[in-house]
Structures are given as C-alpha cells and as structure tokens.
Image (cartoon, rainbow, N blue to C red):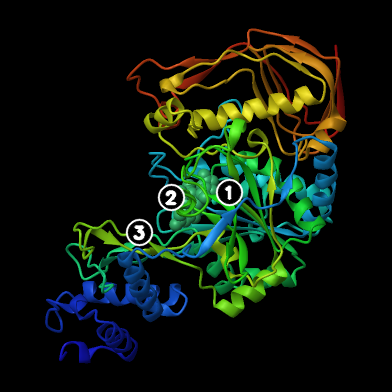
Amino acid sequence: ASNLSLLGAEKMRLASLLVSLGQAHVFDGWPPAGARDDEKRALFAQLATLEKAYPGGLRAYYENAKTLLADAKEGKTPLEGWTPEVPTGARVEAGSAEFLALEAIGMQHVGQTGFVLVAGGLGERLGYNGIKIALPMDLVSGKSFMQWYAEYILAFQARACRADRAIPLAIMTSDDTHERTASFLREHDFFGLREQQVTLMKQEKVPALVDNAARFARADGSFLLETKPHGHGDVHHLLLSSGIAQSWAKAGVKWLAFFQDTNALAFRAMACLLGVSAKHKLEYNSLTVPRTPGEAVGGIVRLKRADGAEMTVNVEYNQLDPLLRATVSAEGDVADGASGNSPYPGNINVLALELAPYIKVLESTGGQMPEFVNPKYKDGAKEAFAKPTRIECMMQDYPRLLAPGARVGFTQLDRWIAFSPAKNNANDAAKKAAAGGPPESASSCEADMYSANARLLAKAGVDVARGAEVRPLGIPVMLSPQIHLCPAFAPTWTELLKKVKGGSISARSSLVIDGDVTQLKGLELDGALILRPSRGSSIKVDGLKERNDGWALQMLEKGEAVPEVLAMRGYRLVQGGSRTLAFCNGKERLVKA
Ligand code: UGB
C-alpha cells in the first residue's frame, strides 16, 4: 500500500477500484518505488483503457461477470421459461418479381444507409496469418474482400446519391487487426472510397477471469492483465461511444447495414434486405438462409413465455439444440421433414437496422449488450476453470434489448445468393463437407461466388455450361466456369437483367467483368475474356465471339511451396491465352462479332 500511495490521482483511483473489486492480487509482488516502473506504467495504461472501453467500466464488468458466472455454475440459461416457435418473416425467392420489387425499394434507401463491417476477428479457424478482409475472394479477379465491399458501396453510391454525398462505412477492428487494416486501406488508397468516408473503430479486449469470484487473470511475466476478445457485440457500443451513429444520423443516414468480413455474397442480397426493412418498417431485420441442422449458425426463433411476453431473436447454434430438447422437440436440432433444413431460419449476421430507434435504444442502455459466459470447468463442483474465461457478447443479440412490440423481422433468401463465407481451414472444411454440411473454406467461398454469377447470367438468358466437381484438399467444389461480375457492372439483379441478353459461356471459360460494361448481349465465350474499361470509359458488347486457350485452375501437388492464399485453396490459376479489352478513351466502345 505504501508503494501504491505514491501513485498519481488517476492511478490511485484505478488501484483502489481494483482493490474494492477483490482484485488486490493484481498487485502481488509489486516492487518498491523506482523498480520496474515501465511495467507498472504499462499496467495502469492498460487499466485506463479497459476502464474506458467497457460500458460502466471495470466495476460493471466485474459485477456482470460475477452474476453470469454464478448463473453458469447453477446451469441457468437466459432461455429458461421461453418456448420456441418458428417465426414469420419475409421469405423471398431470389430473382422473383417480389425480389426485384424489393430491390427497387431498397435502392431508394441505400443512399441513406451507413455500412458497418465487423472485422476484429483474427480467423483462427481459417488458419490465415493475415487479416481476412485482405484475402483474395477469387483468383480470376484477384480482388480482396475489402476491395469488393468498397466497390459495392461505390456502385450503390453512384446510383443512389448526389455527387457530393458519400455512403459512409465504419469498420470495427481489434488489437489483432487494427494496424494491418489501417495500412491495407492506405496502401490501396481506400479502394476508391474517400478517406473521410471510412472510419475505423477499434474494439478493446476484456480481462480474463480465473474463477467464479471473477478474479482477473495476470498475464505471464509482467504486471499486465491477461485479456480476451469480448465478441462482435462490441460494435453497438462502439458506434454509440465513438459518436459515429449520432453523426451519421445528423448527416441524413436512416439505415445501418452490418456485414461480416468474408461473406462477399451478402451484397448481392443487400438491396432486397433494405427493401424489406423499408417496406415493413422494420427496426431490426436479419438476412437469413435455410439452415442445415447442427450447422454453426444461429437460428432465428420466436420465443414465448407463459406471461405473454414474446420476442424474435437469434438462438446461437450451441443453445438451439438444448432449448428444443427441453421444450418442443425431443429430437432437438433436426430437419423439418423433407426439406433437410432446420425450420428455424439461419442467421448470417447481415443485419439491417433503422438508425433513429437504434440510437435511442443504445442511449437508454449505455451501449451495454446482453452477455454470456462459457467457462470450461475442470472439476465436477464447477469451481475451477481449465483456462481463464471472459464474458462475451454478440451483435445479433441486439433485439433482446428491444421493447415488446418492436418491429423485428427477417428476410430469408436462398443460400446461393446470400451466404458463403471463408471461415474454416481446409482440414476442417473437408470434414464438414464429408458430414454433409457447407465447407465454408476459401475454395468453397470462391466457387460459390462463381456459381452465383453463373446462375445470375443464366437467369438473364445466357447459356452457361457447368464444369465438373473437383476436390482440392478433399473439399468438393464447382470451380468452373470462373465468372467475376464487378459491382459497378450490376449491383442489383434488376440491373443485371437489363444489361445482359443471351449468349453462351463454355465450362472451361473465365469471364471477368471489371468496369462499366453497359451491355452484355450475345457474348459467345470459350476461353478467357477480361472486360476492363478504365474509369470514364465503357464497353458495350453485342454479339462478341471469343475463343482462346483460356485460363485453368490447376490442382497443387502435395507439399508444393506456394503462397498461403493458394495453399489454403489447394489450386492455382494458370493464365494461358486470353483476350483483354481495356479501353481508356473516355467513350463507350461497341464490341461486336
Ligand atoms: N468479429 C469481430 O469483429 N470481433 C470479435 O471479437 C469477434 C468476431 P466469426 P461466429 O455467419 O457464419 C457468427 O468468429 O461469431 C467479427 C454468428 O454468431 O466468424 O462464430 C469477425 O471478424 C453466427 O450466428 O463468427 O458466428 C467476423 O467478421 C453465424 O451468423 C464476424 O465478427 C455465423 O457468424 C463473425 O465472427 C456465420
């Protein structure tokens, strides 16, 4: 104590706070004044950050943790007393007249939307060393996920905003991703976005907990606390505490659209999702896909209680099965009859929220999200943890904060148009595929984008041949033909139908549309074609016939030394003969047979 009393006022306040929270052990072995001062300073800097980052500071964190740990020990869950039902929502067939009508409504609102990318996750499951948004989404365009998202926002902006208005983007980063995200964006000139259009907000970690008394864990070899991620639910508190939500509202933003780091398809569904929100005046609207039973995506469930209370919320995959078994289905998380799908729509964390009520709710709750804890106990008495734990929160739990009667809904679309993230390393992905589920690997994510583009063109009357299934690294995927359709070409299905007419693409083909192609009529392609008019120029295709050696995806040999982004896929792109049309004269160029 005599050492501590030499501290400045703020440090003393933090030290007293810790002591009052039963955390005096943090100062065990504290050396005399003058010894290891840098390490001491580092602890207080860390405490100040932790105190500021968590809603209500360290006291609130400690109290919430103790309550949740006591509940966990008793086996209590927040779902007790609730009975699940299949909720009602908008179930829309991709490409149907209803879908196109919703896209049209959505496009009237996309100019007043702020986009929010959660990119604080390190991607341990994917086993990639870099930041996930820098991964190439497909090999034929070579574009990163981040480039794709930026291009989509710019394509929406070009269609929905006056020239002086920009659609804002906030990116949540973490200690694991912040510096690399900032330099990646700078290196690439923000991918065409204006620098002021993009805001990074860094989430902080929370103290790890060693026991049910919520004692903070000390990091090995220093006075620092061990910290762990608090989860993607931090995004809501950050939007409020940074003032971004409020400043966007002042600038005329009406909607927020949240999306994850590696699901490029989300944007193909975005206009429709916003259309449903606007049409049904939904305060909260999640994009969903049919869910495979047991799959690691949450289910959207309407929960009812005996006192008449009800809410439509996401029930995370590890809680869905026990909830169903304890209430409505002895079999748990199983398929609904012949469809092979769970009756509960699968949450994919693509969310559309109305901004004004969102700000009110966050202000009234101080940004505090519902939380949970998941300790792994070492003993039957549930006293000792196998390793330190922490409390966590999820972005999709936001509707639990809403008052009864809040307008919460979902928009169910086919999986092929909305969801195929790169989440798993090849080994795990192969196992998931063998068990009948989606692999969600870098390869399946790429293949699903090619397939979606093939289907979109086919719906517009192009005769697109399909290649055979291949199995790089044991993961079954359909990688041919490879088609990349950039957002500037057609950010909506409606626009694609207007621009594309007939034609054919062989299975061995690669087509990259990367720029302003105003018409794609009667293209007959058997080989590789790149249409890349530079900014200000455009290309109009009318009956172009192109046949060349083409490009091919070649499977890697076992153990071949290749860059990580290829090793995780198990194949490379071999660029043989191709034709590139890349006009830059600022005019429209007609390309005919
Ligand atoms: N993320 C952060 O930004 N910060 C964090 O602290 C953690 C993550 P995961 P998860 O769509 O497949 C979610 O780890 O949490 C970002 C839903 O809960 O990939 O296991 C991270 O960078 C589940 O219901 O996913 O599962 C990434 O962009 C289902 O929707 C995003 O948060 C599932 O995603 C998701 O992180 C899915």
Q: Which residue is mark 2?
A: 318
- For image coordinates 76% across by 25% down, the residue present is 457
- For image coordinates 32% across by 71% down, the residue present is 70
The secondary element bearing badge 1 is classed as strand
Spatial CA distance of label 2 from label 1 is: 13 Å
Q: Which residue is mark 3?
A: 374
Disc 1 C-beta below 8 A from ligand 1: yes
* Residue type at numbered disc 2: Asn
The secondary element bearing badge 3 is classed as loop
- For image coordinates 70% across by 69% down, the residue present is 405
Q: Which residue is mark 1?
A: 347
Q: Which dot, 3 or 2, sits closer to the camera?
A: 2
Q: Earlier in the sequence, mark 3 or mark 2?
A: 2
Q: Nearer the viewer, residue 39 or 398?
A: 398
How far across and how far down the image is residue 310, in percent?
Answer: 62, 65
How far across and how far down the image is residue 439, in percent?
Answer: 48, 31
Badge 1: few (under 14), some or many (20 or more) residues near its Cα, within 10 Å? many
In the displayed structure, does residue 112 sit left or right of residue 342?
Answer: right
Residue 577 in view, yes or no: yes
Q: Earlier in the sequence, mark 2 or mark 1?
A: 2
Q: Quadrant of residue 140?
A: top right
State the quadrant of the C terminus.
top right
